[in-house]
Amino acid sequence: MAHRNPGAFFSLIHSQLFIHVPKPTQSFSDQNVIITGSNTGLGREAANHIVRLGASKVILGVRSVSKGEEAKKYIEENTGSKGVVEVWPLDLANYESVKVFVRRAEGLERLDVVLENAGLLTNTFSMAEGNEYVTSPSTKAPACLPLPQDKPSPLTSSPPSSSP
Ligand SMILES: NC(=O)c1ccc[n+]([C@@H]2O[C@H](COP(=O)([O-])OP(=O)(O)OC[C@H]3O[C@@H](n4cnc5c(N)ncnc54)[C@H](OP(=O)(O)O)[C@@H]3O)[C@@H](O)[C@H]2O)c1
């Protein structure tokens, strides 16, 4: 607890008020990116940066399409880039939703980044799909399912020519 440790408390205040994280500058030119849980928080800000850095497609994997559309609007207004962000439904606590999402992702010409940001912090025990709902029962599923099966996966596409 910060109030029992004055050093930690002042360190927190100092970091929040006086330390500014540098904006990322790496180019995402020609890249397709999926970000889960990107209607808010860190996921939405990551999506905002990646659009700003020139990605050709940024897919917001969200369990509420209306919240995803709001995030898309926010990002488009912030970056001035239209036609980059797509909102795809994805509920990581529902295996069928994950499968539908992944089958759709397999239709992408290429897939360069999957940023598995979705999660939750809870101290209440609950179950989903017969498993403990910790962050979600299938957080890693979107990354695993598109791996090569009976046809080349978009994850195995060659890197864009502009990549370093
Ligand atoms: N912020 C921090 O200081 C911090 C520190 C350590 C780790 N993290 C981790 O970093 C990630 C993002 O943090 P944050 O602060 O940006 O969290 P946040 O604002 O609570 O956002 C979490 C996102 O995950 C989504 N989500 C939750 N359960 C989902 C599910 N079953 N299916 C699909 N999406 C789901 C939420 O969707 P809804 O809006 O629909 O609920 C929301 O978009 C989380 O995994 C968090 O545990 C954060």
Image: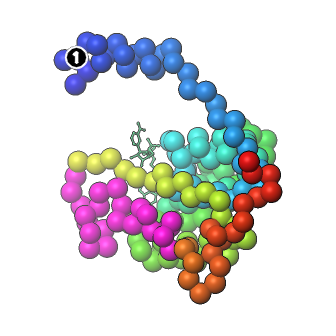
Residue at (62% x, 47% y) in the render: 47
Q: Amino acid at mark 1?
A: Asn
Image height of 157 relative to 59, above or below: below
Image height of 20 relative to 36, above or below: above
* Residue position marked by numbered label 1 in the rendering: 5
93 sits left or right of 39 in the view:
left
The part of the image, by quadrant, that contains residue 26 is: top right
Q: What scheme was used to colour the molecule? A: rainbow
Residue at (25% x, 12% y) in the render: 6
What is the number of callouts on the image?
A: 1
Magenta stretch, main secondary structure, is loop
Q: Residue furthest front?
A: 164
Residue at (74% x, 48% y) in the render: 164
Horizontal and vertical percent position of residue 5: 22, 16
Part of the protein shown in magenta: 124-145
Residue at (59% x, 87% y) in the render: 150
